[in-house]
Image (tube, grey):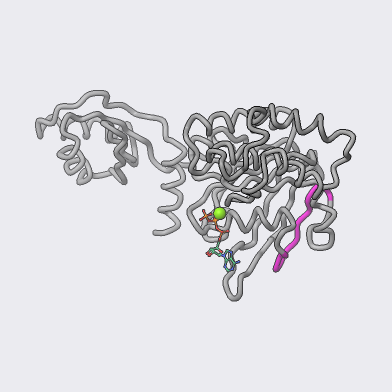
């Protein structure tokens, strides 16, 4: 099967410069319809710029892209009805009510009046905002504002959603609700690119891409990305974690240690080899511990190890 002919978003060496600086650097994306693609990367990596380029809101500097079969360079305006873009910053009208914001975006995208009332009701219910239709957007909670922004993004029923950190700063419960909505949209067949600083969210995506300094460093399923980590993870819960941390960081083969509550997570070159050595070292120094075991690598560890390699 020819993969590229099916892509709903395809970029070839897509670049964007701001003055002398290349902020998006030769991006090659190939996204299939129905994909839920998580875009992660450190601050300033170029995630927002990428999403704005794909939404047709920024001109590209070099390269090319096809969105929903349309050439981005030549047909940016024609692409807009196919795309719903949700900005990283609050972009609703604070003085307008929930309903008025929806109406405003419906107007902007020339949504047919005869179907508008029904669609707004459906989206309000979907976003859990039915009871808040008259509240001014400025007075909604942060989580509700994000859901309203998503509802506005969906008002013209775009097949492609570009969501820029839609859950940043939102409490865990609202974050989960937001992701339930995204999962529903994914199941309905929408193609979604969502940027996120949260690794648990990256884990919920069908594909993940790591951006770093304008470049896409790696793309793959969460499992593929996790398996990319060089070395293995060892977990241990020492009684005196400060002493354990000092001791274990001097051991051969231990590349990095992270603390998670009472646990230490060690990235080691070989689990089979280092596990007994870690056990011996702790016992020798009389540092009591429990739960010493090989642990699966987390997404966060996989990304940090990739970034460390790039910065080395
Ligand atoms: N309009 C602009 N003019 C000049 N430089 C810009 C402009 N917009 C973005 N940049 C620069 O481009 C780089 C990438 O920014 P971008 O906002 O795309 O990163 P990001 O990955 O979304 O970061 P964050 O995680 O902080 O949202 C940054 O160095 C930023 O300062
Ligand atoms: Mg950003």
Q: Can you say which quadrant of the picture contains the N terminus?
A: top right
Residue 215 at x, y = what percent?
57, 58
Q: Position of residue 64 (x, y in %)?
A: 75, 61
Asked whether 39 falls inside the magenta stretch, the response is no
Residue sitting nearer the eye, 250 or 213:
213
Find the residue positioned furthest to the bottom.
20
The quadrant of the rendered image in which ligand 1 is seen is bottom right
Q: Is residue 60 magenta?
A: yes
The segment highlighted magenta reads 59-69
| Drawn side of residue 131 relative to residue 238, left or right | right
Q: Nearer the viewer, residue 60 or 27?
A: 60
- Identified at 41% across, 41% down, the residue is 301
Image coords of residue 241 (percent x, y): 19, 35
Q: Residue at x 23, y 30 (%)?
A: 276
Residue 132: name its quadrant: top right
Is residue 218 visible in the rendered structure shown here? yes
Asked if residue 8 can be seen in this view, the reply is no
């Amino acid at each position: 099967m020819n993969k590229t002919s099916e892509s709903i978003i395809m970029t070839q060496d897509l670049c964007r410069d701001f003055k002398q600086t290349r902020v998006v650097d030769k991006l090659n994306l190939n996204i299939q319809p129905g994909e839920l693609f998580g875009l992660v990367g450190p601050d300033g990596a170029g995630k927002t710029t990428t999403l704005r380029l794909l939404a047709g809101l920024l001109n590209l500097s070099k390269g090319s892209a096809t969105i929903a079969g349309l050439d981005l360079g030549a047909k940016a305006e024609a692409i807009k009805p196919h795309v719903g873009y949700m900005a990283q910053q609050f972009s609703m009208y604070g003085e307008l009510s929930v309903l008025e914001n929806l109406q405003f975006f419906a107007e902007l995208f020339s949504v047919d009046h005869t179907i508008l009332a029904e669609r707004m009701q459906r989206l309000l219910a979907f976003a859990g905002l039915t009871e808040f239709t008259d509240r001014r957007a400025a007075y909604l909670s942060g989580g509700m504002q994000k859901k309203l922004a998503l509802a506005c993004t969906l008002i013209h029923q775009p097949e492609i959603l570009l969501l820029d950190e839609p859950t940043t700063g939102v409490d865990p419960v609202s974050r989960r609700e937001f992701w339930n909505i995204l999962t529903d949209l994914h199941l309905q067949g929408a193609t979604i690119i969502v940027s996120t600083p949260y690794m648990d969210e990256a884990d919920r995506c069908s594909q993940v891409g790591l951006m770093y300094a304008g470049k896409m460093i790696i793309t793959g399923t969460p499992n593929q990305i996790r398996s990319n980590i060089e070395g293995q993870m060892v977990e241990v819960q020492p009684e005196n974690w400060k002493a354990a941390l000092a001791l274990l960081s001097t051991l051969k083969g231990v590349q990095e240690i992270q603390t998670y509550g009472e646990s230490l997570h060690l990235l080691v070159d070989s689990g089979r080899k280092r596990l007994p050595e870690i056990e011996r070292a702790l016992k020798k120094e009389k540092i009591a511990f429990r739960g010493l075991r090989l642990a699966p690598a987390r997404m966060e560890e996989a990304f940090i190890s990739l970034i460390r390699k790039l910065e080395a």
